[in-house]
Image (spheres, rainbow, N blue to C red):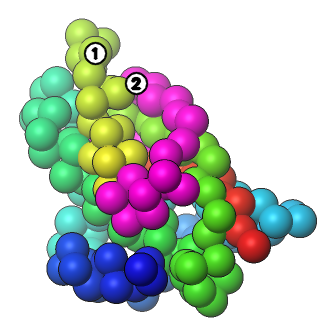
Amino acid sequence: MSVYDTLARLGVELPTAGAPAAAYVMAATTGNTVFLSGHIARRDGKPWAGKLGKDIDTATGQQAARGIAIDLLATLHGHIGDLNRVTRIVKVMSLVNSTQEFTEQHLVTNGCSEFLAEVFGEKGKHSRSAFGVAQIPLGACVEIEMIVEIA
């Protein structure tokens, strides 16, 4: 099944890929590996600001991480032209804007990881890191970057 058929079945329409907010590119390829820059959580087109453990709960953080996964796929699609070229999601790194007491960064990041596995099946299962941080640009609640292997 095509990745695009799977996205349609899930009711997901890829947004227009975002532009960099500073001195970097959204994606860079070397060989058959694509490195996607960190994407921040957005809601209604604006940074989804907040801190996990203070004003955002884990379930809401998972929704934010899922939304980032969709944005990452939009960037990847714009960069390589066809998501069916993906042979493996290699790695996801997640930064969660959280209080010192919050310890569920890994569960927040599941919002991204589970979505990628749903879209790509076995090819979507990846290695991962999830960190709690004191702040993310623009006050966003979550930021995620991704490494992808393509054919």
Q: How crowded is mark 2: few (under 14 residues within 10 Å), some or many (20 or more)?
A: many
Q: Residue at x 41, y 70 (%)?
A: 71
Callout 1 amino acid: Thr
Which stretch appears magenta? 116-143
Residue 81 figure quarter: bottom right
Marks 2 and 1 close (CB-CB < 8 Å): yes
Q: Which residue is drawn at 28% across and 15% down?
A: 103
Measure the alpha-carbon separation of dots 2 and 1: 8 Å
Callout 2 amino acid: Gly
Q: Where is residue 150 in the image (x, y as percent from the top left)?
A: 71, 68
Which mark identifies residue 141?
none
Residue placed under numbered mark 1 in the picture:
103
Q: Quadrant of the N terminus?
A: bottom left
Residue placed under numbered mark 2 in the picture:
132
Residue 11 figure quarter: bottom left
Q: Which residue is drawn at 38% across and 65% down?
A: 119
Left or right of 15 on screen, residue 52: left
Q: Which of 32 and 53 is in front in this view?
A: 32
Left or right of 49 on screen, residue 54: left
Q: Residues within 10 Å of mark 1 (few under 14, many from 20)?
A: some
Q: Can residue 112 be seen in this view?
A: no
Label 1: which secondary element: loop
Left or right of 128 on screen, residue 121: left
- Assess whether residue 48 is covered by the magenta stretch: no
Left or right of 134 on screen, residue 23: right
Q: Nearer the viewer, residue 131 or 34?
A: 34
- Assess whether residue 137 is covered by the magenta stretch: yes
Above or below: residue 137 compared with residue 56: below
Above or below: residue 14 compared with residue 130: below
Q: Where is residue 73 in the image (x, y as percent from the top left)?
A: 47, 71
Label 2: which secondary element: strand
Residue 48 figure quarter: bottom left
